Image (cartoon, coloured by chain):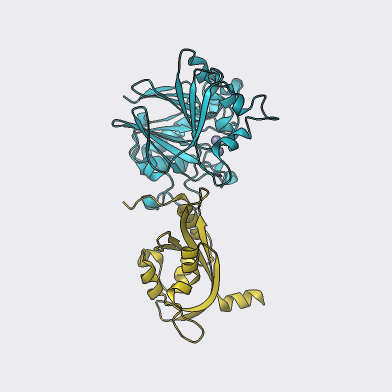
Amino acid sequence: MEGQRSLELILARNLLSSISTPAFLVDAEGVLVFYNESAGGLLGRRFEEAGKMSAEEWGAAFGPFDNHGQPIPFERLPLTIALREGRPAHASHCIHSQTGEQHDIEVSALPLVSTDGGFRGALAIFWPMAEAQEYGG
Amino acid sequence: MRIKVWGARGSVPSPGPETTRYGGNTSCVQVTLSDGTIVVMDAGTGIRNLGLTLAGPAPRVNILLTHLHLDHIQGLMFFAPAFRPQTEIVIWGPKSSEASLESRIARYISAPLSPVEVRELPCDVSFREAPATEWEIGPAHLRAASVTHRGPTLGYRLTEGDRSVCYIPDHEPGLGASLHDLTPEWISGYDLAHDASLLIHDCQYSDDEYPDHVGWGHSPLRDALTFAHRVESERVLLFHHDPLHSDDFLDAFAGTATERWCELGGAAERLELAVERREIDLG
Ligand SMILES: [Zn+2]
Ligand SMILES: [Zn+2]
């Protein structure tokens, strides 16, 4: 068995699995430990099929790139900023799904810090831009 | 290792003719180790009666607080050994970034809520935040882990030799999750409770009552049993009875619990509802 997850990650996972906002959860080492069904829809692969991924793996698998088609350096991704700098970060960029589709998305990432001050990981929520505009308009 | 229940009620003391058999005192369990060391888990109103039995010299008492909800600390001020200068009391509890354990407890043991202040207690009292790693009390190893409740809350596991007791009185591990389907690493409290000789666990609500109390930090019968089954504890004591549950209700509830436990493959004699003054010798 894997070591017990921290309570903060367990609660975050329970929250993410109970909402339809697409979201990712990474542990303190940056390993992608969960994403919910809606994120699976956006990424073209369910978490149960994909499994855990290291930071390099998820960076490569979902290949975020900017509006000019240039890959976004790993250290500039909101999730990486939340992890490395322990602060919230937001960006809009494109991702490729596993089925070859391209999605313009907004991403907000938040660090997870426990009540005793320990850093436990980060979560990122995604919002497809088309839907965001529809919602906004 | 001997266990004695001094209070099995949750939320608020509920004395009265309807609760004489299961008892109305709130959370308190005494663990006596092989060398006589006394460890007290939670200081609900049950600790008052425990204190009265410690009339002789009890030089050192360790109190493990799971969290600081009133039903787990209300008895502290009425614990007789705290008023004897020769007693040393060590109080363990959850860490918080907001304030020290002592100052959080002092909000209750201070005016206007209390006639005495912590610093006025005649005993030698100290406060220690439960460490993230294992520690020792007498011949026992202790472990604490954060569990799903409301606010910073710990569960404890106390091990002496090959016997262990795991105490998680306030716990809602099934909140937003299916305990049947989750892998162990994602179940709150799993590591702490796995393979324990005795699991003392929250079972405040019946399954019918639970929908009105989702997110309140307590388990319905269904989740208490599934958790106990998943962690493969040898024996189970269902704990933290709802103040509204009369003796008659709890008798019937025990019957349902046993039936459902057997359906999960458990042995009927390994599961019971906690009753005040119940003693269990874990060997
Ligand atoms: Zn309680
Ligand atoms: Zn509580």
| Residue at far bottom of view | A68
Residue that appears at 49% across and 82% down: A66
Q: Which chain is cyan?
A: B
Please say whether residue B180 is visible from this viewpoint.
yes
| Residue at far left of view | B162
Q: Pick the residue in front: B153 or B206.
A: B153
| B99 is higher (above) or lower (below) than A123 | above
| Residue at far right of view | B112
| Left or right of B25, for residue B266 | left
Task: Locate the C terminus of chain B and report the quarter of the image it occupies.
Answer: top left
Residue that appears at 54% across and 74% down: A91
- The image quarter containing residue B242 is top right
Residue that appears at 50% across and 49% down: B175
Q: Pick the residue in front: A104 or A17.
A: A104
| A97 is higher (above) or lower (below) than B251 | below
Please say whether residue A36 is visible from this viewpoint.
no
Q: Position of residue A57 (x, y in %)?
A: 36, 71
Q: Pick the residue in front: A36 or B80.
A: B80
| Left or right of B196, for residue B86 | right
| Left or right of B95, for residue A30 | left
Q: Position of residue A16 (x, y in %)?
A: 50, 60
Residue that appears at 55% across and 65% down: A88
Task: Locate the N terminus of chain B and report the quarter of the image it occupies.
Answer: top left
- The image quarter containing residue B45 is top right
Q: Position of residue B62 (x, y in %)?
A: 45, 27
Q: Quadrant of ligand 2?
A: top right
Q: Drawn colour of chain A?
A: yellow
